[in-house]
Amino acid sequence: WLRLPFLVVVLAGAAAAALLRLWS
C-alpha cells in the first residue's frame, strides 16, 4: 500500500496547518 503513508503525511500536514492558524 503506497497511499497509506501519503495520506498520513497529508493528514499530518493539514493538522499542522490548522494548529499554526489557531496559534497565530
Image (spheres, rainbow, N blue to C red):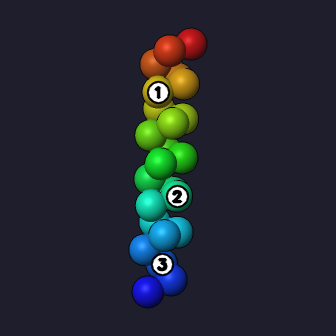
Circle 3 SS class: helix
Residue 23: x and y, percent?
50, 15
User: Do callouts 2 and 3 mark residues in contact (Cβ within 8 Å)?
Assistant: no
Q: Residues within 10 Å of mark 3 (few under 14, many from 20)?
A: few
The numbered mark, 2 or 1, whose residue comes first in the sequence reads 2
Q: Amino acid at mark 3?
A: Arg
Query: Gap in Å between the C-alphas at discs 2 and 1?
Result: 15 Å
**If the image is split into quadrants, where does the N terminus sit?**
bottom left
The numbered mark, 2 or 3, whose residue comes first in the sequence reads 3
Residue 18: x and y, percent?
47, 32
Q: Residues within 10 Å of mark 2 (few under 14, many from 20)?
A: few
Circle 2 SS class: helix
Q: Residues within 10 Å of mark 1 (few under 14, many from 20)?
A: few
Residue under pointer 1 = 19
Residue under pointer 2 = 9
Vertical arrangement, residue 10 with respect to residue 3, above or below: above
Residue 15 image-quadrant placement: top left
Q: Amino acid at mark 2?
A: Val
Q: Amino acid at mark 1?
A: Leu
Residue under pointer 3 = 3
